[in-house]
Image (cartoon, rainbow, N blue to C red):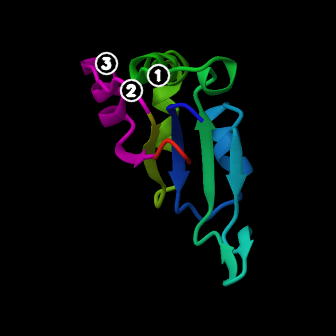
Amino acid sequence: MDSEINAELRILEFGCDPSEITKCLNLQPTSTWVKGEIVSKTGKGILRHQENGWAWCSNLDSEEKVLDFRDLFDDIFRNLNPIKDKFQYLPNNSVIQLACCAYIRNCAPAFTLDERIIKLLAEINASVDFDIYCLNASE
């Protein structure tokens, strides 16, 4: 596996069915889950979701290999900026997060949050979560 990156908008901790988030934003999620749903089963037991969740990934994640977060953020901006006013109608307890993940091998991806993305994240009251995994050549 070469280096890979992805970015997704997550809405968490709301009390309603995830389909209500989809209706509110008029945006089809990439994935949804409900509290208690099984995430995975291992030899150590069953891991379950601890909260309701709704996620939308940048379309670029599946279309082509992207190694620059700016490309993903541009796609997120194009899709979310026109609907940013709808975020105010989400359930009160909703937590909004831009989740970014990088699996790094051989080359490091570019990561820049330009002023458009920072302003959009502030307007929808979103935080940023960034995970970096440095992989060995054998992984």
Between label 1 and label 3, give the one nearer the viewer.
1
Q: In the rendered view, does 34 fall on the left or right side of 91? A: right
Q: Considering depth in this image, is 129 or 19 the residue closer to the camera?
A: 129
Mark closest to the chain's N terminus, 2 or 3: 2
Q: Can the viewer see residue 89?
A: yes
Cα separation, mark 2 vs mark 3, equals 20 Å
Q: Considering depth in this image, is 109 or 33 the residue closer to the camera?
A: 109
Cα separation, mark 1 vs mark 3, equals 20 Å
Count neighbours of disc 2 (C-alpha within 10 A) and say few if under 14, some if 14 to 19, many if 20 or more. some
State which region is magenta. Answer: 106-135
- The quarter of the rendered structure image containing the N terminus is top right
Q: Amino acid at mark 3?
A: Arg
Count neighbours of disc 1 (C-alpha within 10 A) and say few if under 14, some if 14 to 19, many if 20 or more. some
Which residue does the image show at 67% across and 73% down from the upper left? 48
What residue would you read off at disc 1? 67
Which of the 4 quarters of the picture holds residue 51? bottom right
Q: Amino acid at mark 2?
A: Pro
Which of the 4 quarters of the picture holds residue 107? top left
Query: Is 108 one of the magenta-colored residues?
Result: yes
What residue would you read off at disc 3? 116
Local secondary structure at mark 1: loop
| Above/below status of 6 relative to 45 | above
